[in-house]
Image (cartoon, rainbow, N blue to C red):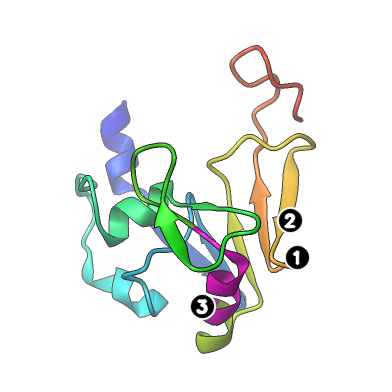
């Protein structure tokens, strides 16, 4: 079953303006075209661009980058979001990966949205 995840796209762009990925950004990620060089299926490495697209997280109040409290990838600030969007002529980053109270949560002045639609996640989060 888990092998099917190795075939899924790492990211998508909707209507040339919305960048979608599971986790977030990477300090190694400057342009969505970088993703095109990776052929699926493939295992995701423990560090680097592909890992970060799946496991990085936005962090309120942070400027730039720092190691992620989860022990893998990074956390990034709203300044990172705004720079990435500006440099790539995008309007929004849409991601998942974190439980959020109301099923969705904005970050960086509504330029990043986290969507988490698993109801009653782990039996403890009434989030959807």
- Mark found first going from the N terminus, 2 or 3: 3
Q: Which residue is mark 1?
A: 110
> Where in the figure is residue 124, as x and y percent of width and height?
67, 14
Q: Which residues are magenta?
A: 76-84
- The answer to which of 91 and 28 lies nearer the viewer is 28
Q: Secondary structure at mark 1?
A: loop
Identified at 26% across, 34% down, the residue is 3
The answer to whether residue 16 of the structure is visible from this angle is no
The answer to whether residue 63 of the structure is visible from this angle is yes
- Whether residues under marks 2 and 1 lie with C-beta atoms below 8 angstroms apart, the answer is yes
- The answer to which of 61 and 44 lies nearer the viewer is 61
Quadrant position of residue 1: top left
Q: Which residue is mark 2?
A: 106
Q: Secondary structure at mark 2?
A: strand
Q: Which residue is mark 3?
A: 84
Vertical arrangement, residue 79 with respect to residue 89, above or below: above
């Amino acid at each position: 079953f888990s092998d099917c995840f190795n075939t899924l796209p790492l990211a998508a762009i909707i209507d040339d303006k919305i960048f979608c990925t599971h986790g977030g950004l990477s300090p190694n990620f400057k342009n969505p075209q970088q993703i095109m060089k990776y052929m699926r299926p493939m295992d995701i490495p423990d560090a680097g661009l592909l890992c970060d697209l799946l496991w990085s997280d936005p962090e309120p109040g942070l400027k730039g980058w720092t190691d992620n409290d989860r022990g893998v990838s990074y956390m990034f600030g709203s300044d990172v979001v705004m720079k990435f969007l500006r440099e790539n002529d995008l309007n929004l980053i849409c991601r998942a990966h974190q439980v959020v109270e109301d099923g969705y949560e904005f970050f960086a002045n509504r330029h990043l949205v986290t969507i988490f639609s698993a109801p009653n996640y782990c039996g403890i989060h009434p989030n959807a």
